[in-house]
Image (tube, rainbow, N blue to C red):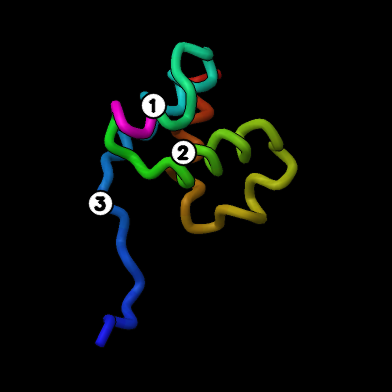
Amino acid sequence: MPSKGIKQHNWSENNMLEAVKAVQSKRMGYLLAAKTFSVPRATLFRYCQILKDDQNLRKQTRKKTNIIARIRAKAG
């Protein structure tokens, strides 16, 4: 029987920062950056989309605001 718990992320925030920077600077696509930095592709895509749309940043990522804020500070 499958577990009913929520999966916790097991990727490094620093790896996510580097992956977002690589995608935003157009050095890599989403798939290559996700594989290179060992982060989930869907999460990487979502974070990059959130950074494009600053108005929805706080609504969509209440718990992950700390990570997004760090990404914005380093990428900007």
Majority secondary structure in the magenta region: helix
Q: Is residue 8 left or right of residue 29?
A: left
Q: Residue at x 47, y 51 (%)?
A: 64
Report the front residue among 21 and 4.
4
Residue that label 2 marks: 44
The alpha-carbon separation of the residues under discs 2 and 3 comes to 14 Å
Mark 1 / mark 2, whichever is N-terminal: 1
Q: Residues within 10 Å of mark 2 (few under 14, many from 20)?
A: many
Residue that label 1 marks: 33
Q: Position of residue 62 (x, y in %)?
A: 55, 57
Q: Which residues are magenta?
A: 32-36
Mark 1 / mark 3, whichever is N-terminal: 3
Q: Position of residue 20 (x, y in %)?
A: 46, 27
Vertical order, 23 against 34 (above or below): above
Report the front residue among 15 and 73.
15
The alpha-carbon separation of the residues under discs 1 and 2 comes to 8 Å
Q: Residue at x 31, y 55 (%)?
A: 9
Q: Residue at x 38, y 26 (%)?
A: 32
The alpha-carbon separation of the residues under discs 1 and 3 comes to 16 Å
* Residue type, mark 1 in image: Ala
**Residue 10 circle label:** 3
* Residue type, mark 3 in image: Asn
